[in-house]
Image (cartoon, helix red, strand yellow):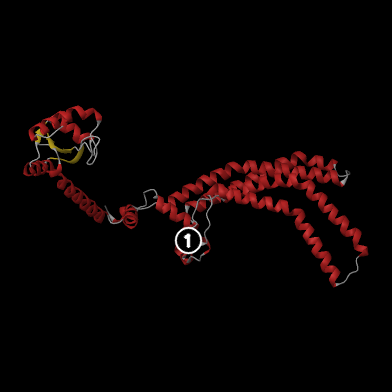
Amino acid sequence: MSKDEAQEKTEEATPHRIRKSREDGQVAKSMELSSVAIVGLGFLTMFALGPMVIDQMKELMTHTFTTAPSVHLNAGSFVLVLRDTVVTFFVTIGPFMLSMVVIGTLINISQVGIRFTTKPLEPKFDKLDPIAGFKRVFSSKVVVEYIRDIVKVLLVGYVAYVIITDDVMDFFELMDSPTERFAQQFGSLALLLALKIAASLLTLAVFDFAFQRFQHKKKLRMTKQEIRDESKDTDGNPVLKGRIRQAQRDLARKRMMQDVPTADVVITNPTHFAIALKYDKSSMEAPTVVAKGQRLIAQRIKELARESGVPVIENKPLARTLFKVCEIGATIPAKLYKAVAEILAHVYQLKGKEV
């Protein structure tokens, strides 16, 4: 593999890379989707809370102009009136402001989940690199966003033109109507305009969200070398891990060989498999495999058995089955009780031991 091929980012990001990216505040998020949701839901909230806000503003203005002639203007009274007016104003529009905060928060959570980090606020001096900045200006992402913004402007202009031209004659008829009716009609038109614009931009916002996710996944792609390096950092050096596993296997094999002299019988294939069984009716429910192996290990088990005086019995089908279905330290399955019992009975008879 050439150096260029090794540096090509063709591999999907690992879970560790994705998790680290989230910790650094790098997530796929569409500002267009957030804007559309805030505009649409914001105008619906305004329409729902509008009558209440207008009534409270009317009461505030009525109270202010009614009490104004009786207020003695001085520094203390001015501060008091200003404080009461500001407090009343924020209490009036507070539900709307709170609803907008909740909407914006929920939209962001729905896109990226919950994650608190200050790393995006940290200065990144690599962004001052003019060459990297030049590449970003002419990147495919910037081109797509430029086309998206043009389409957005044209779409908003078209929707607004259609709606306004359809209702413009109605406004001429309202010129002599009461102010309240005119305001109500104008508010309905504004709500209709906002909702239709939001609905028309929703498809564009969904496309933008999908594009942002694609770009984010592409940015997180890794080279094969990066994956190998990450594996070394997170899981340890593969060579060292292999040595540890080999040492563990050698230790387990050594312990297994130490248990062979304690077995009651060794069942063989005769050359391919060897399984050492032990049975103590006072402490075991069924015969237990204390050692097993094939080829060279099987030969070594048989040698240790003969040196220790453990009977070696040839039974090809039973040896093959025991090697396949039984692990070291496990009892034999019930379906093999009869076959093993016959062998143990024969061994006990040769040793003069009670069954």
Residue at x 84% of width, y 52% of height:
58
- Image quadrant in which you'd find residue 205: top right
Number of residues whose C-alpha sits closer than 10 Å to that of mark 1, classed few (under 14), some (14–19) or many (20 or more): few
Quadrant in the picture for the C terminus: top left
Please state if 52 lies on the left or on the right of 37 as rendered.
Answer: right
Give the side of residue 50 with respect to residue 314, left or right. Answer: right
Foreground of the two, 93 or 281 = 281
Of residues 327 and 99, the one drawn nearer to the viewer in this rendering: 327
Residue 34 in percent (x, y) is at 60, 49
Q: Residue 130, position in %: x, y?
A: 47, 65
Q: Is residue 207 above or below residue 128?
A: above
Point out the residue furthest to the right here: 70
Q: Quadrant of residue 270?
A: top left
Q: Is residue 151 visible?
A: yes
Residue 307: x and y in percent read 6, 44
The disc labelled 1 sits on which kind of residue?
A: Phe
